[in-house]
Image: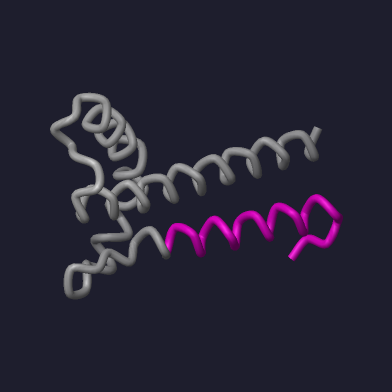
């Protein structure tokens, strides 16, 4: 039972990791005018992704504001996800830290 719960948490963290990666790449593509938010599909995808990621990024942005236009909050999220995945893996193999 515990192993199934840990696998589910790991899957959710992996999914969140991919969503953040997509948001980062999409933000670059929008900022460099490769894709345009005037396209209805792009605008809808961008809006949905922002609605998913903003509740996670907002508290981090309060602590670490953008530096010179560079938002470091997704990097903090990646570090937290990495830590949590390693912690889950250590519990799964029986080495609780």
The secondary structure making up most of the magenta span is: helix
Q: In which quarter of the image is residue 35?
A: top left
The image quadrant where one finds the C terminus is bottom right
Would residue 50 be found to the left or right of residue 10 on screen?
left
Q: In which quarter of the image is residue 2?
A: top right
The image quadrant where one finds the N terminus is top right
Q: Toward the viewer: 30 or 94?
A: 30
Identify the residue shown where x is 72% and y is 42%.
Answer: 6
Instruction: Verify whether residue 36 appears in magenta.
Output: no
Would residue 8 be found to the left or right of residue 43 on screen?
right
**Residue at the far front in the pictured view:** 34
Q: Is residue 2 above or below residue 92?
A: above
Q: Position of residue 71 (x, y in %)?
A: 27, 64
- How many tags in the picture? 0
**Residue at the far right in the pictured view:** 94
Identify the residue shown where x is 51% and y is 48%.
Answer: 17
Q: Toward the viewer: 68 or 4?
A: 68
**Residue at the far left in the pictured view:** 38
Would residue 87 be found to the left or right of residue 61 on screen?
right
Q: Toward the viewer: 25 or 20?
A: 25
Would residue 40 be found to the left or right of residue 75 on screen?
left
Q: Where is residue 9 in the image (x, y as percent from the top left)?
A: 63, 40
Q: Toward the viewer: 46 or 96?
A: 46
Q: Is residue 52 above or below residue 31?
A: above
Q: What stretch is highlighted in magenta?
A: 76-97
Q: Is residue 43 above or below residue 64?
A: above
């Amino acid at each position: 039972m515990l192993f199934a719960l840990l696998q589910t948490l790991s899957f959710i963290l992996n999914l969140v990791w991919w969503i953040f990666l997509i948001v980062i790449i999409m933000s670059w593509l929008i900022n460099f005018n490769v894709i345009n938010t005037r396209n209805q599909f792009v605008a809808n995808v961008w809006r949905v992704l922002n609605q998913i990621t903003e509740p996670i990024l907002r508290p981090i942005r309060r602590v670490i504001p953008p530096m010179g236009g560079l938002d470091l909050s997704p990097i903090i999220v990646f570090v937290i996800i990495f830590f949590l995945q390693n912690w889950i893996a250590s519990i799964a193999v029986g080495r609780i830290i």
